[in-house]
Image: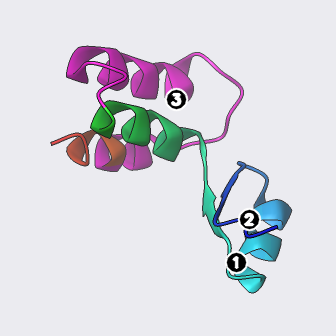
């Protein structure tokens, strides 16, 4: 199938992907990628990252959100 990237936040799926040499990308990574591909403005991306921490049931620490925001440049 030549899969290179798997979009998931499930830990078991991420681990399995890594064992198969597939790079897992979670929700934060999807937002950062969308920014880098100019699909989101910096402001939109930062807002989405912060909302993933505070406005969803996704378990993500504030420190990890700050790291993702730093990757926005």
Determine if the magenta segment contains residue 66.
yes
Q: Which of the 4 image quadrants contains residue 70?
A: top left
Q: Which residue is mark 3?
A: 53
In the rendered view, tell whether residue 3 sits above or below residue 61.
below
Distance from Cα at disc 2 to Cα at disc 3: 19 Å
Disc 1 and disc 2 in contact, CB within 8 angstroms: yes
In the rendered view, tell whether residue 18 sits above or below residue 50.
below
Point out residue 47 in the picture as x, y percentages from the top left corner: 36, 17
Q: Earlier in the sequence, mark 3 or mark 1?
A: 1
The segment highlighted magenta reads: 38-67
Point out residue 28 in the picture as x, y percentages from the top left corner: 49, 41
At horizontal 48% and vertical 46% (from top left) the residue drawn is: 29
Distance from Cα at disc 3 to Cα at disc 1: 25 Å
Disc 3 and disc 1 in contact, CB within 8 angstroms: no
Labels 3, 1: front one: 1
Q: Main secondary structure of the magenta part?
A: helix
Residue 18 numbered mark, or none: 1
**Crowding near the residue tagged with mark 3, few <14, some 14–19, many ≥20 C-alpha atoms within 10 Å:** some
Point out residue 32 in the picture as x, y percentages from the top left corner: 38, 40
Q: How many marks?
A: 3
Labels 2, 3: front one: 2
> Colour scheme of this structure image?
rainbow
Left or right, residue 60 beside residue 41:
right
């Amino acid at each position: 199938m030549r899969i290179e990237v798997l979009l998931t936040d499930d830990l078991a799926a991420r681990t399995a992907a890594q064992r198969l040499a597939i790079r897992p990308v979670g929700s934060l990574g999807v937002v950062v990628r969308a920014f880098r591909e100019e699909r989101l403005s910096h402001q939109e991306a930062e807002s989405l990252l912060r909302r993933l921490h505070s406005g969803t049931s996704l378990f993500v620490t504030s420190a990890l959100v700050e790291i993702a925001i730093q990757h926005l440049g």
